[in-house]
Amino acid sequence: MKIKYYLIIILIFVTGINQAQNQAMETNSLMLENESNLGFNETVEQLSKTITEKGWKITISHDLQEIMKKNGKDVLPVKVIELCNPTYAFGILSEDESRYVSPMLPCRISVYEKSDGKTYIARMNSVLLAKQLGGNIEKIISQAFADGEDMIKPFIE
């Protein structure tokens, strides 16, 4: 009975990764953008909460509007949230042959407003890139991407 239970859990996990990969591969765009169903501040707050609840770490949040303001430029609100899952990062950083993809770490999700007054969430289509890298890197990046998509899903449906 336990074996059957574990097989079902594995099947659900693999199916989730495959669905996220398929959705990402439906477009050749390196960047993905979706409208949020919440306002800017609410999206940032709730997304940050979801990230930490899912066991990921927020390494830093860049307030690009504030940075631009300090440089005499006025832009609409935009925050870039850098997030890390230590397990996935370890899978990349612990092997010499995969450390070259470390510039992709940590993952980033951007939340911003456009002139239409709506809030958007953007992120890199890392599955598109991972397919070109193959092997363990593809597996880890695809899993991380699937987790990220699960985290933003409630905001873009």
Image (cartoon, rainbow, N blue to C red):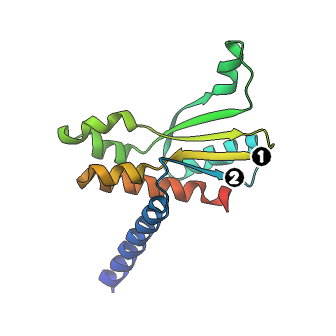
Which residue carries the number 1 mark?
118
Q: From the viewer's perspective, is 86 left or right of 59?
A: left
Identify the amino acid type marked 1: Lys
Q: Residues within 10 Å of mark 1 (few under 14, many from 20)?
A: some
Which residue carries the number 2 mark?
35
- What is the x, y in percent for residue 103? 36, 33
Q: Are marks 2 and 1 in contact (CB under 8 Å)?
A: yes
Residues at marks 2 and 1, CA–CA distance in whole angstroms? 7 Å
Sooner in the amino-acid sequence: mark 2 or mark 1: 2
Place residue 42 in its image quadrant.
top right
- What is the x, y in percent for residue 133? 28, 49
Residue 137 numbered tag = none
- What is the x, y in percent for residue 34? 64, 53
Q: Residue at x 63, y 47 (%)?
A: 121
Place residue 4 in its image quadrant.
bottom left
Q: Is residue 35 above or below residue 68?
A: below
Q: Secondary structure at mark 2?
A: strand
Q: Quadrant of the C terminus?
A: bottom right
Q: Residue at x 69, y 22 (%)?
A: 66
Q: Is residue 61 above or below residue 28?
A: above
Q: Nearer the viewer, residue 84 or 134?
A: 134
